[in-house]
Image (cartoon, rainbow, N blue to C red):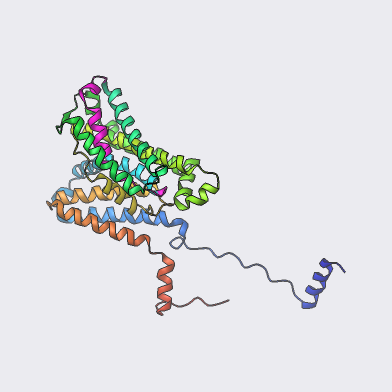
């Protein structure tokens, strides 16, 4: 008797058909791990609405004016533009398992180099090219130190931070360098269709970053390297080369941001963009990017930048000191990191162990 005939006899002896496979249970939207980034983004939108409500409560005389509200929103977005651009690059670096503490110093170095008299003599094209080239070059140095020099990213980029600030001070002679180029200076005041040009630049950079992360092999490799670099290497990914590209991308964003800040201030100096690296890292974290690497979103990082900019704007309206603002930012960073370590399953398991919820009936 064949195996198939034995199975038929056995099924007939039992007297009923075999049990069908259990149907897959659908996970509700608010429990689905795949929807975590969407839930986080909606939470950040809720934070923005709460900040708006607080502002309306503190200064109802201002928030009752619709024109003022629209203009204030544009101010918030303009203030967030430069930090938002470097946050895009920072998000890629962190997803790839690294960190970049030198972004503020690279903005200062790129801006100072682009506003020297020699560079300005080449016009806006020469200034933009110089800022971008300096940023990419310094980013490649960071990447080489991390990928081939085997330095910890924290140490490598910290060294670049100190060196870039020193070089910027040497080039500028510790003096503020004035930008005399009309095109560069007009970027901060130009408003196509009522939208500030700096905000448009941010949206373009963020859009390209989103496509690069979510629709290209480069993005998939970035996530793979951040999640497990050894597995990525065994899968044939050039981990060292890709790491250098990630830091070069961060440097590119620094060069773009340097031109944006130069346009806002119509000048540049070695002390520009201080602590921008902390704002970029914090924005990426509260936007859902894991510090350990392997996960993150461009949209979430942008929401994080806007939240910080809105907090700064709210504190300015309420005439609160900068010290209080920094304390609030620090608290937000701590809470964001703690929330990354909490999952819904952990909460439900805790509740069941302590009898706070009913256990699921066994079928």
Q: Residue at x 45, y 45 (%)?
A: 222
Relative to residue 245, is residue 318 drawn left or right? left
Q: Image quarter for residue 140? A: top left
Percent of width and height locating residue 66: 21, 45
- Compared to residue 123, the image places residue 300 above or below, namely below
Quadrant (top left, top right, bottom left, bottom right) of the C terminus: bottom right
Relative to residue 292, is residue 263 drawn left or right? left
In the orientation shown, which residue stands out farthest toward the front?
A: 149
Asked whether 348 or 266 is in front, the reply is: 266
Asked whether 61 or 289 is in front, the reply is: 289
Q: Which residues are magenta?
A: 95-122
Asked whether 102 or 145 is in front, the reply is: 145
Q: Image quarter for residue 180? A: top left
Relative to residue 214, is residue 275 drawn left or right? left
Main structural element of the magenta stretch: helix, strand or loop? helix
Q: Residue at x 80, y 70 (%)?
A: 7
């Amino acid at each position: 008797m064949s195996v198939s005939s034995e199975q038929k006899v056995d099924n007939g002896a039992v007297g009923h058909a075999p049990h069908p496979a259990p149907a897959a249970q659908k996970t509700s939207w608010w429990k689905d791990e795949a929807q975590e980034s969407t839930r986080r983004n909606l939470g950040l939108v809720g934070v923005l609405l709460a900040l708006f409500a607080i502002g309306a409560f503190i200064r109802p005389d201002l928030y009752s004016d619709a024109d003022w509200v629209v203009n204030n929103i544009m101010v918030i977005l303009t203030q967030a533009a430069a930090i938002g651009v470097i946050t895009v690059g920072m998000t890629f670096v962190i997803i790839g398992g690294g960190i970049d503490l030198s972004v503020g110093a690279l903005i200062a170095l790129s801006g100072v180099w682009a506003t020297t008299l020699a560079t300005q003599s080449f016009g806006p094209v020469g200034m933009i090219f110089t800022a971008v080239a300096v940023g990419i070059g310094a980013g490649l140095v960071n990447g080489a130190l991390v990928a081939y020099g085997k330095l910890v990213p924290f140490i490598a980029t910290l060294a670049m931070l100190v060196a870039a600030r020193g070089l910027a001070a040497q080039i500028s002679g510790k003096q503020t360098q004035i930008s005399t180029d009309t095109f560069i200076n007009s970027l901060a005041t130009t408003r196509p269709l009522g939208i500030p040009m700096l905000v448009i630049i941010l949206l373009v950079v963020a859009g390209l970053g989103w496509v690069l992360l979510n629709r290209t092999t480069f993005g998939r490799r970035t996530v793979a390297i951040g999640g497990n670099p050894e597995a990525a290497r065994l899968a044939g990914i050039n981990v060292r080369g890709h790491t250098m590209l990630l830091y070069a991308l961060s440097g590119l964003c620094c060069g773009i941001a340097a031109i944006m800040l130069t346009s806002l201030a119509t000048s540049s100096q070695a002390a520009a963009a201080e602590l921008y690296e902390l704002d970029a890292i914090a924005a990426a974290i509260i936007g859902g990017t894991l510090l350990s690497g392997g996960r993150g979103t461009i949209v979430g990082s942008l929401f994080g930048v806007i939240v910080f900019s809105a907090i700064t704007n709210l504190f300015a309206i309420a005439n609160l000191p900068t010290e209080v603002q920094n304390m609030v930012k620090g608290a937000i960073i701590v809470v964001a990191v703690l929330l990354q370590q909490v999952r819904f399953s952990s909460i439900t398991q805790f509740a069941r162990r302590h009898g706070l919820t009913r256990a699921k009936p066994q079928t």
